[in-house]
Amino acid sequence: MAKNPADSLIVMTELVLPNDTNTFGNLMGGRLMYWMDIAAALSAQKHANLPVVTASVDNISFENPIKLGNSVHIEAKVTRAFNSSMEVHMMVHGEDLVNRYRYKSNEAYYTFVGLDPFGKPAAVPALEPVTEAELRLFEGALRRRQLRLILGGKMKPNDAAELKALFQL
Ligand SMILES: CC(C)(COP(=O)(O)OP(=O)(O)OC[C@H]1O[C@@H](n2cnc3c(N)ncnc32)[C@H](O)[C@@H]1OP(=O)(O)O)[C@@H](O)C(=O)NCCC(=O)NCCS
């Protein structure tokens, strides 16, 4: 049975403590990626109702550092489900609750695979986008999947029709 992106919404909030920071007093990238991995895995699991593993992580650009004492908000939603794999989009914001200032830190895509009781890839429900923004993410997911499978050595560039079409105007 198909599900909507909203069905997989996970909102995670963390507080940046001294042990989470680098020598500049900013949240360390590795700690943020750890929290993002958990938020995205929960989102994929909510969609699939199966145990999941992280198959790949797309590039992450840290646009703004998150300061010690600020809070971190991670919003994760499945953008598209394929056979056993799902792409999860995350939007990450920092927030200074004292000065009432919220800022974007980064956004990223992680891919998860649902597993059967033997640890093998298992079919996951389809995803039907509802809003225009969800539809845009859904359509782009096919090209992003092709790019990550090419980079992972699992697809030949010549087979990536939708990705190639971007460059053949
Ligand atoms: C991810 C994993 C389950 C894929 O298993 P596999 O036996 O290679 O299976 P397949 O090649 O049949 O691929 C299964 C699905 O994974 C997807 N996949 C495989 N490698 C991928 C990659 N690098 N990026 C994105 N998706 C990938 C495939 O596209 C396929 O998706 P689909 O079923 O929706 O078409 C397996 O490689 C694994 O268990 N990796 C370790 C996961 C892990 O431990 N993660 C924690 C971080 S270390």
Image (tube, grey):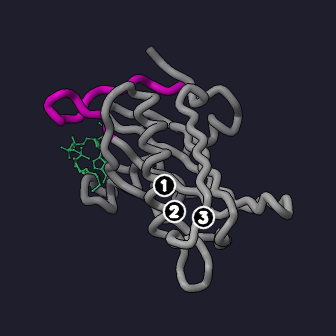
For the residues bearing labels 2 and 1, Cβ distance under 8 angstroms: yes
Contact? badges 1 and 3 (CB < 8 Å): no
Amino acid found under the numbered disc labelled 1? Trp
136 vs 119, left or right, is right
Q: Which region shows up in magenta?
A: 113-128
Of callouts 1 and 3, the N-terminal one:
3
Instruction: Identify the amino acid type marked 3.
Output: Val
Q: How packed is label 2: few (under 14 Cα within 10 Å), some, or many (20 or more)?
A: some
Which numbered circle lies on residue 15? none
Measure the alpha-carbon separation of dots 3 and 2.
10 Å
For the point 70% across and 34% down, which residue is it? 132
Q: Position of residue 108 (x, y in %)?
A: 54, 56
Element carrying mark 3: loop
Image point (54%, 74%), residue name: 21
Disc 3: residue Cβ within 8 A of ligand 1's nearest atom: no
| Left or right side of 7 for 49 | left
CA gap between label 2 and label 1 equals 5 Å
Whether the magenta-drawn stretch holds residue 137 is answered as no
Type of amino acid at the residue the image marks with label 2:
Leu
Q: CA distance from mark 1 to mark 3?
A: 11 Å
Front disc: 3 or 2: 3
Residue at which label 1 appears: 35
Residue 32's disc number: 2
